[in-house]
Amino acid sequence: MKTALIMEGGAMRGMFTCGVMDVLMENGITFDGAAGISAGAVFGCNFKSEQIGRPVRYNKKYCRDPRYCSIRSWLKTGDLYGADFCYRELPDVLDPFDRNAFAGNPLAFYIGATDVDTGKCVYHRCTDGGETDMLWFRASASMPIVSRPVRIDNHSYLDGGIADAVPYAYMEQLGYNRNVIVLTQPKGYRKKPETSFAMKLFLRRLPKICDAMRHRHEMYNRQMDELNRIEAEKRALIIRPPEDLRIGHAEKNPAELERVYRVGRKEAEKRLTEIRQWLPEGGSIQNYRDQQGQVDHDPAGRISGEGRYHSVAGYELQYDSHKDQEGETCSGQ
C-alpha cells in the first residue's frame, strides 16, 4: 500500500491547500509520494521541504509587490507573475526555499505541465529543488495568456491544469492507492466552457493549447464526477472547501489570503482523526522511513515503454516513458 498527497491548482485558492498542508506537517503526517498541478505544485513543494507556513507568509508579504504579480510585470516581461522574482529572488534570497530539506526528504514529488506542441500533460519528478525543478514549477503554474511558455529540454510548456486538473489518475498509475486529494473548489462545482475572445486571440498561434482550453471544462467536470465516485467507493479521502472560496486569481489583500488559508486549516483539523485512520499507521513520518531514511519509490512496479494507457473520466492517458528513480518524465493526455 502506497500513499500520496494530491493537490489541485487554482491560483490563490491554493491558500486553502497551504492551510491543509500545514496542519498535516504540524501533526507529523507524511506520505510516500505527492503530486501537484499549478498552484498545487508551487505551493505543494513546501510539503516536501517541510517548511510550515512559508507559502502563505511570502504571498501575504509580497502580494502587492509589482515584481511579484502585476500588470506592469505582464506588459514588461510577458509574465503576470514575475519569473525572476518568483523563481529566483524569492526562493534564493527573500524567503529561502530549503533545497537541502527538499532533496533529503524521501517523499517522491511529481508535478505536471502542458506541452504546447501536443496539448498533453507531461509529468516530472522533482528531486532537488534546483534549476531544472524550478523551471518545472514555473511551467506548471504558467497560466495561458498571462504567461510565456517555459522552455525545457527543447519543449515549451504552460499550466498543467490545462490538460490535467487533478493528477490522481497519474498517481494511481504509478501505484499510489491510498491517497488524500486536496481540491480547491466545493463539491458540486462545475466548470463552464471557455468562450473568451481574448483567449482565442492570444492563443491563435498555439492551436493545441487553444483546443485543450476549449475542452478543458469537459475534462475538469468528468474528473470531478470520477472523484465523486472514488470518494463514494472509499478509494480516496478528499478534502475540499465547504463553499466557494471567493478569492481572486491574483489576490492583493493579505487578509483574504489569510482567510482562505484559515479555511484550509479548519477543514484539515476537522478531519484530522479521519485522515489518521485513513493512512497506514496513522501517516506518522517514522513509519515511512527505514533505518537509512529511505523508502521505496517504485510502487507496484515501474512504468516503462510506450503505448501504456489508462482511461479516466472519459479520457485516455498515455504514459510514454517513465523511469521513476532517474526522475524522467511521462506524458499524458
Image (tube, rainbow, N blue to C red):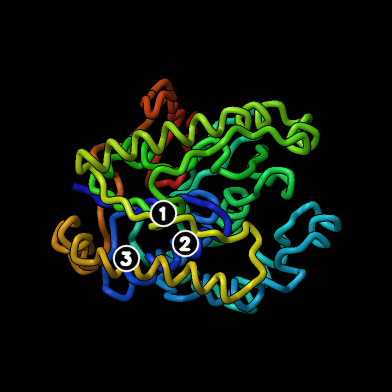
Dot 1 alpha-carbon crowd within 10 angstroms: few under 14, some 14 to 19, many 20 or more? many
Residue on which disc 3 sits:
268
Q: Is residue 332 above or below residue 23?
A: above
Q: Is residue 197 above or below residue 151?
A: above
What is the x, y in percent for residue 101? Answer: 42, 71
* Amino acid at the residue labelled 2: Cys
> Residue at coordinates 44% horizontally, 32% vertically from top-left?
321
> Which quadrant of the structure image shows residue 167?
top left
Query: Would residue 124 be found to the left or right of residue 253 on screen?
Result: left
What is the x, y in percent for residue 330? Answer: 47, 36
* Camera sees residue 87: no
Residue on which disc 1 sits:
109
Query: Would residue 330 be found to the left or right of residue 206 on screen?
Result: left
Tell me whether the residue at label 1 lies in contact with that at label 2, contact meaning CB atoms closer than 8 angstroms.
Answer: yes
What is the x, y in percent for residue 198? Answer: 78, 38
Q: Nearer the viewer, residue 37 or 321?
A: 37
